[in-house]
Amino acid sequence: MNKYTHTSDFLRNKFDDLSDLEKVDFLQNLEDYLKRQDSSYYQNNISYITDAEYDKLKALYEKILTNNPYIKGKDYLNSVGHKPSDKFEKVSHKIPMLSLSNIFDRNGVGEFIERVRRYLSLDSNVNLEIVSEPKIDGLSATLIYINGNLHIGATRGDGSQGENVTQNIKTISNIPHKIEDPNVPEILEIRGEIYMKKSDFFELNERMQKEGKQTYVNPRNTASGSLRHLDVNVTKSRKLYFFAYAWGEISCNIADSHFEVLDLFKGWGFDVNPYTNINYTYEDIIKSYDDLNEIRSSLDYDLDGVVYKVNSLAYQDRLGFISRSPRWAIAHKFESEKAITKILDIEIQVGRTGSLTPVAKLEPVNIGGVVVKNATLHNEDFIKGLNSEGESIRDGADIRIGDQVHIIRSGDVIPKVVDVNIKDRKKDSQAFIFPENCPICGSPAKRELNESSGKVSSVRRCTSGLYCNSQVLGSLEFFVSRDAMNIEGFGGKSMELFYESGFIKEPGDIYTLQTRQSQGEIDILSLEGWGELSMNNLFQSINQRRSVSLDKFIYSLGIRHIGVNNAKLISHQLASIENLLSTVENITHDPNDALQAFIQNDGLGKVVISSFLSFLQNNKNISILQNLLKSVRVTDMVMEISEDTAISGLSLVFTGKFNSMSRSEAKEQAERMGAKVLSSISARTDMLVIGEDPGSKVKRAQEHGVKVIDEKEWLSLLDI
Ligand code: IVH
């Protein structure tokens, strides 16, 4: 099997530790992997890895080649883009369409200026003008005008050959079909970026969503797919735009500087990006970069960096090219996991367990290829500028609607607000007031005191439990989720639809849907997006889940603090649903007794037990439970006990923290293998199994002459 199938396979490998043969294999795999990513990006407009991962891999590839000059014959780095698709006629670029080298930090800016000055042997008193332009995140195109008439429009393709997309390009409203100036050069090849506006992208996605179709990932990929569509009407309907920033063949000299050429382009009716500056110093360049980074979320098109170009065309000529990129230009990329954007609003979301989470609604910003519109603000204290210890963070700056904030998005993690700029805050801005009532049901929302730590929780919770719509919906979604009852067909917003229509008010209603539908009590087919087929599929998946084991059942109830493991432990103790129902009886008679019964099972913490018992003390929960049991058969918890193992028949005690599994898991495993697990040491104990920080039990074991083994010995005993 191939060792290299994921990005992480390359990143975690230490290239220098590999043998020569392995090195060749590694590099070949890395090259193939990068080519596959290029192909899906350029040909199919799909990115399977994030921009950050791509940049890391490319940088690794470059580093290996630089550090190992004996590895020859790799021309991958010299290739740009990808082979043009066979769908279109090919166009050979007379002047190749090249790519830019990237830099990722400010040092790179200093080095670029130094390199250029050194190459041109410029004295320190000679000025060097550098033009900065936004790096538009679209796809590059070239437009050939003959005597002012648009003759050919083509994509970049692999840099030497592109695709002839003239008809599609002619649908772009800000590309002139004719240049009216009588002095326009006979041959004029204008290059630039085709892009889709963010607003049009969101509108398109909203439409797709309404029609129940798959939505697009980002404006760049959508623009690329739209331009390279065989049906010109599709391209037209997608509203694409063009910014001119470069050129290919021009039949006569038209200017002395890049900036002057751009001015001519404007005069001929092309859009040139308004944030194009001439910079005279390193500081000017950095300011242009920072300014663009700050405003980028407010622009209606995506940028992924800033391009710096030597302004003088005479200097550009002297500097020429190195492999496939100009020496006179460089791209300074924005950080691929961070961005600055504005908070448009702060919304409070209510979770399944009633927690109130503040979510920043953002001016949409593209972070590494993903459009981010929401980011968590964690909790009330974070907004105020306090950490969980009550100490001040960000120099005590609070966060308000209208503020510019820094966002981080890495991997699949929910985007987070990490910092705030308060220097441009408006004078009349108001501190955000965190609600003390649940925004959904209006009940008081409280911050509980954690008895063991003596601290007030950072999370405010709605106190009305299943009387709160948001918590009911959250619980229903949890009930059908994969680790719980695993009922397929309620994905996306379906459960919300069933809940809002009143067809499902509690879990038991799920199982009566089919009967109610056939008796005409409800009409599922009237719900948006639902038809016979989807409805029957749903009934089928519900019917497949009418029987469930006790632990899954308890877990599905979504009781606070009761995850998969705790649900298993509770189920082992209760063994059957009948015992669970008699616990309900017991609690009403003697809550303390019920608590004691559970406390003897030392795998369960006090917080877990009281959470479980208080769930069972709530009448509404009991009625929900009973309705559910009318339709669901809960099977007893039977532990399959092996008789012939190294530990069968032994009495064991576990203590300390385990690394390879939780202590409760270790105990359950021991029981399954025929051992008896006790909570305290006595002379009858056969063995004490210790994890980290075992505490006083070790001493007691020694006093009783009980054998003590650590986690490693325990695992080898189990043969793991
Ligand atoms: S100049 C010979 N300027 O970035 C240099 N490129 O990584 C030609 N891009 O292929 C490119 N904005 O698709 C240049 N202001 C800008 C740009 C820009 C976006 C894209 C373009 C190019 C890629 C290079």
Image (tube, rainbow, N blue to C red):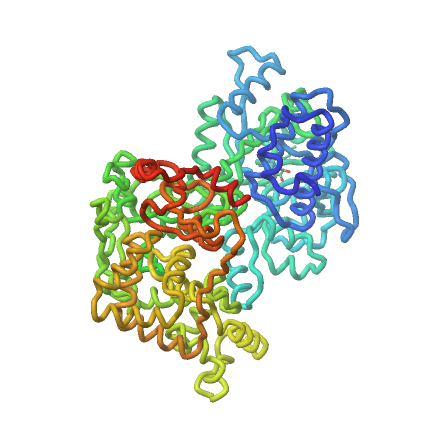
Residue 466 in sight here: yes
Looking at this view, is 20 or 677 the one in front? 677
Position of 311 relative to 669 (above/below):
above
Residue 424 in sight here: no
Residue 470 percent location from the top left of the image: 34, 65
Q: Quadrant of residue 472?
A: bottom left
**Image quadrant occupied by the C terminus:** top right
Residue 543 percent location from the top left of the image: 52, 76
Looking at this view, is 616 or 62 the one in front? 616
Q: Quadrant of residue 620?
A: bottom left
Looking at this view, is 361 or 619 the one in front? 619
Position of 620 relative to 121 (above/below):
below
Q: Is residue 225 left or right of residue 587?
A: right
**Image quadrant occupied by the N terminus:** top right
Looking at this view, is 23 or 603 the one in front? 603
Q: Is residue 252 left or right of residue 674?
A: right
Q: Is residue 45 left or right of residue 71?
A: left
Residue 325 percent location from the top left of the image: 66, 29
Residue 333 percent location from the top left of the image: 53, 34
Q: Quadrant of ligand 1?
A: top right
Q: Residue at x 42, y 69 (%)?
A: 496
Q: Residue at x 54, y 60 (%)?
A: 204
* Number of on-image labels: 0
